Amino acid sequence: MEKGTWVVKSGLAQMLKGGVIMDVVTPEQAKIAEDAGACAVMALERVPADIRAEGGVARMADPTIIRAIMDTVSIPVMAKCRIGHFVEAQVLESLGVDFIDESEVLTPADESHHIWKDNFRVPFVCGCRDLGEALRRISEGAAMIRTKGEAGTGDIVEAVRHMRAVMGSIRKLVNTPEEELVAEAKALGASLELVREIHQTGKLPVVNFAAGGIATPSDAALMMQLGAEGVFVGSGIFKSSDPESRARAIVKATTHYNDPAIIAEASQGLGAPMSGLDVKTIPVAELLATRGW
Amino acid sequence: MKVGVLALQGAFIEHVGMLQQLGVEAPLIRLPEELAGLDGLIIPGGESTTMSRLMRDFGLMQPVRELACSGFPLLGTCAGMILLCQETNRAELETLGVMKVRVERNAFGRQVDSFECDLDIPPLGEEPFHAVFIRAPIVKSVHTSVEIIARLPDKTAVAIRQGKMLACAFHPELGSDMRLHCWFLDNFIG
């Protein structure tokens, strides 16, 4: 009986596919998310929109909150640690969380090195802006990838940019002749082994979700049509006027992402979405997606 | 032969891939009208609460229940097994309730306790089946009409058969061993 193997870690990500992972800050929110059909929740102290508004250093959540959420729901519970902060990751693993998000939404602890995720039995998900970043994280042991988008904005533009970058590079590698793959690997800053694998299979070796800016059912379906295998919704649900209805609508739109009539019906009467923040108005120093490399 | 795969959430593409390799047409099923003309249905692994919610929202519970009661072949893996069973340790979870068993969800603990191991599954032959258990359920009690197909070394029941329905707590769709799918196609549908 072997635990913590690659098959078991990447396998949980496969079971999350087609689903919506929702940010929650209380057990009550976690219950609403579970009842609405979330395939997992992300246990946090503050949602990204509040982290952005309040400023200061954002760290791993208080274990009390994470434990309370784990005790409330039966779906997988994820939690975030800072980039490179392997002790926060050790703490989260000891709490028994089901997935760790090494996340740019928290203030990075290490600007040069991400966590060596192979050292852990618990699987990790990491953010990326392009294929090179995704492959570097997979080389470190990430069992799941998500495009970063720009968290806490409700603006989908960065999520689209990052998903198009990843999927476009994959399409390019598939059509790249074998002798040019070494140069491609060098340009991407990724291992030749992974670059060759993508050239052959035409897909990432792990599951890839979209994140950062999803606020409506159409946003979720847009990311699915662009190639995401599921979505993370952070501030978009509990910063809207009717979280319960919005959560259910986003779950429906993620499943039926190719059916505009169902997305239209799901989008009706949801009340106000989160107010949002145009990414172009954010000072460069306050962008979250540029954290990590 | 045409075997649908319930595609509301979870690892449905993996089942489709296996069925196609076996030369079987495998349409994705998301709405009740898509159930017409199938020879069997697979309910995949994923999150059982999510699938239950979506089955209710899109009117799939009753049609699938009726199919099951008419002797239609069904295979449920992990969350699929939970959805087929009559009773779980989570009372508010609506299931199809067509297999006369009680199932315990997340029976091994959290994700760090997920595991892989070799299982003896007599109908698949002598060679052990390498099974992957991810936040897996177990079968707690069965009615006399249910046959236990596989057990862990500690005797915990992890695969069951009732008429034309087959369910397992592990994920035969992960990996490359297609014997369980072959057995389902040959002996439950064929």
Image: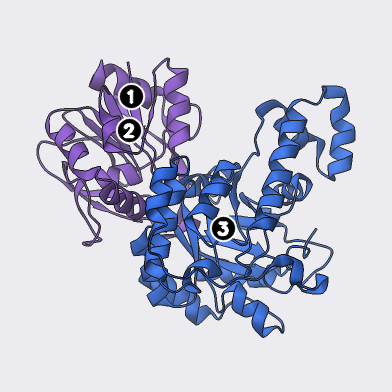
Chain colours: A blue, B purple
Side (left or right) of A62 relative to A253? right
The answer to whether the residues at label 2 and label 1 have Cβ atoms under 8 Å apart is yes
Image quarter of residue B98: top left
Judged by depth in the image, the label closer to the viewer, 2 or 3, is: 2
The three-letter code of the residue at mark 3 reads Val
Q: Are marks 2 and 3 on the same chain?
A: no
Judged by depth in the image, the label closer to the viewer, 3 or 1, is: 1
Q: Chain of mark 2?
A: B
The three-letter code of the residue at mark 1 reads Val
Q: Chain of mark 3?
A: A
In the picture, the quarter occupied by the C terminus of chain A is: bottom right
Q: Is residue B118 visible to the viewer in this orientation of the structure?
A: yes
Q: Position of residue A236 (x, y in %)?
A: 53, 67
**Depth check: B56 or A278 in front?**
A278
Q: Position of residue A22 (x, y in %)?
A: 49, 63
Task: Return the residue at label 1.
Answer: B3
Query: Where residue A122 is drawn, which disc sits there?
Result: 3
Task: Return the residue at label 2.
Answer: B42
Please tell me whether residue A278 is drawn above or below residue B52 in the rendered image. Answer: below
Q: CA distance from mark 3 to mark 1?
A: 35 Å
The residue at 42%/54% (across/down) is: A251
Side (left or right) of B89 relative to A82? left
Q: CA distance from mark 2 to mark 1?
A: 7 Å
Query: Where residue A231 is drawn, which disc sits there?
Result: none
The three-letter code of the residue at mark 2 reads Ile
Of labels 2 and 1, earlier in sequence is: 1
Q: For numbered disc 2, what is the local secondary structure?
A: strand
Q: CA distance from mark 2 to mark 3?
A: 29 Å
